[in-house]
Amino acid sequence: DWRGAGVAIPVFSLRSEESWGIGEFLDLKKMVDWAVQTGQRFIQVLPVNDTTMTHTWLDSYPYRANSIFALHPAYLRVTAIDRLKDNDSMVAYEKLAAELNVLPEIDYERVTLMKWEYLKAVFLQSGEKTLNSSGFKEFFEANREWLEPYAAYCCLRDIYETPDFRKWKMYSVFNPDDIAEFCACGNIYYDKVSFYYFVQYHLHVQLLEVRDYAHAKGIVLKGDIPIGVSRDSVDAWSHPELFYMDSQAGAPPDDFSVEGQNWGFPTYNWDEMAKDGYAWWKARFRKMAEYFDAYRIDHILGFFRIWEIPESAIQGVLGHFNPAIPFSIEELQSYGFYFDEHRHAHPYIREYMLQSLFGEYAGEVIHDYLLECGYGIYALSLDFNTQRKIENHFCGKSDEKSLKIKSGLFALTDEILFVEDPYQKRKFHPCISARQTYSYKSLTDYERWCYDRLYVDFFYHRQDAFWKNEAMKKLPPLISSTGMLVCGEDLGMIPQSVPEVMNALQILSLEIQRMPKDPDKEFGDVTDYPYLSVCTTSTHDMSGIRAWWEEDRNKTQRYYNYILQEKGEAPYYCEPWICEKILAMHMHSPSMLAIIPLQDWLSIDGNIRRNNPVEERINVPANPRNYWRYRMHITIEDLLKNSDFNKRVFELVRSGGRE
């Protein structure tokens, strides 16, 4: 019956007086102190793996790791390694660090460049001492299997100025013997290679220091395992047999993104992974267990099935679940739906649609981008019949006309009712957004009725036992490989078997009041959450309480009257007392853990919270090029000094029966 509370905050978002423009691992020690002071027991972070690919702000995305083992160099407290003996250089770095540390958001490029330069200078100064130490030698032998390929990858990425190993002139195909020679002491590249050993060793030491400090204070660190890795990662380079590189992983349309999400990750070859008992995954979990006592499996639905998107698509709408059991043409006809591949599995384009999609540019679109088939029927020309071709054509064009035509052409590619399975020819998946298309609306009433039957059966019944079996093959050996507490991010289109599997394996579910698991409810009932769950007010992919409050006045009014049980008109702004009432509700829920984003904890105090709640947003999932740069607006030191606020948090935690 034990229940606890915690705080969620990305490492990069931490702000302390000692950090250099971005949160650092050692900042977590002060967050441990704050958790102790406020009666919390868990600190949850986002993924901490290295994402360095381009040395630009595009690398700020924490879910696109270049290695499942390597830690992110930006999280190092570089001065804890050594201070530069050149006093002028040291003063210059500290001046720049102070300038970057007071910015309202992270300047990712300047911060990472500064830290790289400092690390290279400190490596020249004390690298040899570190590499000769017994601690480093022990670390190297324990991690050599992944550390050498990672260091070689980083060197080659920078030599060829691209993380895309397929474009490297040498070593584009991974060979263990070649890489061992590349990394050998005495090789011309050894200084560059050993620099990455040096950086990873110090990251390891600092994160272990945080872990031990948290243990001593009775605080649990909870990590995050992304469902995917980059197609340009060292893992895809060194273990290509484990991935399908000609497809893309993502998520179907949902509350986060109406067009679906395309993460760009390769999908997994689970059959190949099973041959050695999922050794790659087990090694990944065991590495995380060195630093964390609990973890969140990002998109746990990916272990049941993944949303696979063809390489020719940009948006997630045109994907399909893999694995899945597609329909044969005979099965489709057994539902009373007489399938015509050209009509139902190719873009439905009729003249009457074009004016609403393209407006004044409809004539130009017909002339330049479409083929006329007669009787008001059109098809996309060969040069524009995929989203990838359309994207390439409009690359770099941002004028209103280009954006409108591009958007309209994308919409035309989505005008299909079925997606052909790429592995089983002449078998088809219903398109997940079909019922929003002109193609669907043009069906007869009977055809729509038949389509609805097969659609519901396909997505909600047909696959359930099959997907349950897939998950039960993969998850038990993985979660039993460590003693960590397992939590699953089970949001989105959830198969019926998911709660059953998670409960059987004692994996905590994720409960969010504004994203109820019951599709017939607008808001979740916090009093009805299962014990084996983590409840929260929002996630890094969502607006915080305050920004959400201002997004939809009608929904806010219903929440105010029916959930908060308050009378009258809802206040325009989410006032501190409202935020506190929402948090208190979550503290009293039956969930084992109530882990609240720091922004929502701060929302209960009008003096301490940020003025503009929109600035608290970490990520916008609908934007694949989101700049992940949110940072606390006050330092952790100031947070620790705010005794009145901290007492209020403590009382909220304790009054909810959490300890």
Image (cartoon, helix red, strand yellow):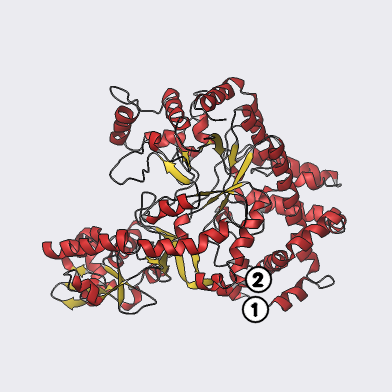
Instruction: Using the image, determine if residue 636 lies above or below residue 463.
Output: above
Mark 2: secondary structure: loop
The answer to whether the residue labelled 1 contacts the one labelled 2, judged by CB atoms less than 8 Å apart, is: yes
Residue 629: image location, x then y, percent: 55, 46
The reply to whether residue 67 is visible in this rendering is: no
- 10 Å crowding of disc 1: few (<14), some (14-19), many (20+): few
Q: Give the CA separation, mark 1 to mark 2.
A: 8 Å
Disc 2 marks which amino acid? Tyr
What residue is drawn where x is 74% and y is 65%?
Answer: 144
Residue 477: image location, x then y, percent: 56, 61
What residue is drawn where x is 64% and y is 61%?
Answer: 283
Instruction: Using the image, determine if residue 605 lies above or below residue 253.
Output: above
584 left or right of 631? left
- 10 Å crowding of disc 2: few (<14), some (14-19), many (20+): some
Instruction: Using the image, determine if residue 178 lies above or below residue 434.
Output: below
Q: In which quarter of the image is residue 186?
A: bottom right
Instruction: Using the image, determine if residue 405 lies above or below residue 528.
Output: below
Numbered tag placed on residue 169 in the rendering: 1
Residue 608: image location, x then y, percent: 54, 26
257 left or right of 489? left
In the picture of the structure, the residue carrying the numbered disc 2 is 160
